[in-house]
Image (cartoon, rainbow, N blue to C red):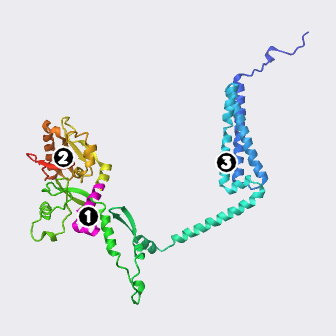
Amino acid sequence: MDLSLEDEEDRYELRITAEDVREAYLLDARRFMQLGLVGEVVFWLALIVGAADGPVRLVAMGAYAGAAIAIAWGVIQVGKASGMRPAQQGLFLLLALAPLVRLIPVAAFIGRNSSVASLWRPPAQTGRSAEAARQRAQTRQQQRAEKSSRRSKPAALEKRQAADELEVFDGQKGVQRVDTQAAVRAMPAAPAKHSVEPAARAVQWPANDMARQQALARLSTALPRIRLIDTEGHADGAQMPPELIMRDLNIPLDGDLSLLDLPVTRATKGAFGVQYMVEDGKRFNAVLASDLADAALSMDELHRMALANLRRLVKGELKLKRANPKEASYRAMRIKLDGSHESSVLLLDDLWDKTFKKHTPNGVVAVMPSRDECTFIDLSALTKGGLADLREAMLQAKRLNGEVVNAILHRQGRHWALAGELDGV
């Protein structure tokens, strides 16, 4: 008789699949990662709020080491769960130990913060560090006190100091800041005079110099503007006579013209009478002869300064485009600048000799109907419809402005010559 209690239905077989192994590895990895996170938190808490004694230092160091080991082991378990080969697991382990690189910024953090650095110093150095920290705190407190005392100066004193300095333009050195009070202090001592209140006596001699510097500052923004087309044979650099200037201004020629304070007008480029405009508020005013005298500038110095300002304007805003882009045969090129000084571009030799040379290899013919219009063509285009293009540009300017300067200009070398007028304008 068989007394065996085994039954086929009571037999169970425990089978461990690859999925079970992977889940077990992942579970271990998660636990080790959690332990590593706890170690990180303990480490940073010990760094930030710990006291400067041995046990806390040991806790911080132990927490960081434990966190690194736990994270490394967790990453290894992830590698096993992923079915990596030993070589791949070794590489993965190197990646797992990468957090140890954080010891570099941690060391820098400790070095910059004395309260944290005390956790990592031996007890013998702690006293000296505390004394150094107290000295640095006292130094910072003194610096803050000095800053607050400087800020508490009366506003009137600051205004007086600002008024003692003035930005001016020197024709040779450019814009400079002048200390008028320093000039007063450098003045040779005058013979003493009896006075009831000597402190109230003001020094008057720098007034003329200050007026000159203010006039220079105003003229430092001057820009050239072509006002006359025919200089009637006057040499370059010459001051145009009053009768030509007044004819341009439509002023009757009565009385002694030498007594008039007229705009400075310089003969330039063989064909132009150039005046100089400064912006006063929202309008441009011409530089007068009296302005030049107040600034103690020569006309040539003013001219060089104005051309330098024009070059800066051109460098930032100059555009060149076809005057009529809808017509492929249209050969005229139109200059666009700021809407006020397009015609002044005729004064810049470097533009015509270099920048525009590729558009006018055979020579330049141009028109400037108004101060804000300048159109030019290559000399060879005159026989290919270019003259009609210039006439159309002139008529368009006339429709916009009502009155135009009807003159054809031909560039010869570095000078311009009046070549005639356009018919039908």
Label 3 crowd (10 A; few <14 / some 14-19 / many >=20):
few
Distance from Cα at disc 1 to Cα at disc 3? 68 Å
| Residues at marks 1 and 3 touching, judged by CB atoms closer than 8 Å | no
Q: Which residue is mark 3?
A: 106
The span shown in magenta is 285-308
Q: Nearer the viewer, residue 301 or 420?
A: 301
Q: Which residue is mark 2?
A: 412
User: Which residue is painted at 20% across and 46% down in the image?
Assistant: 413
Q: Which residue is mark 1?
A: 298
Q: Is 363 contained in the magenta span?
A: no
Q: Is residue 268 above or below residue 384?
A: below
At label 2, which amino acid type do we have?
Gln
Q: Quadrant of the N terminus?
A: top right
Distance from Cα at disc 3 to Cα at disc 2? 74 Å
Distance from Cα at disc 2 to Cα at disc 1? 28 Å
Q: Quick check: can you spot residue 26?
A: no
Disc on the earlier residue, 2 or 1:
1
At label 3, which amino acid type do we have?
Val
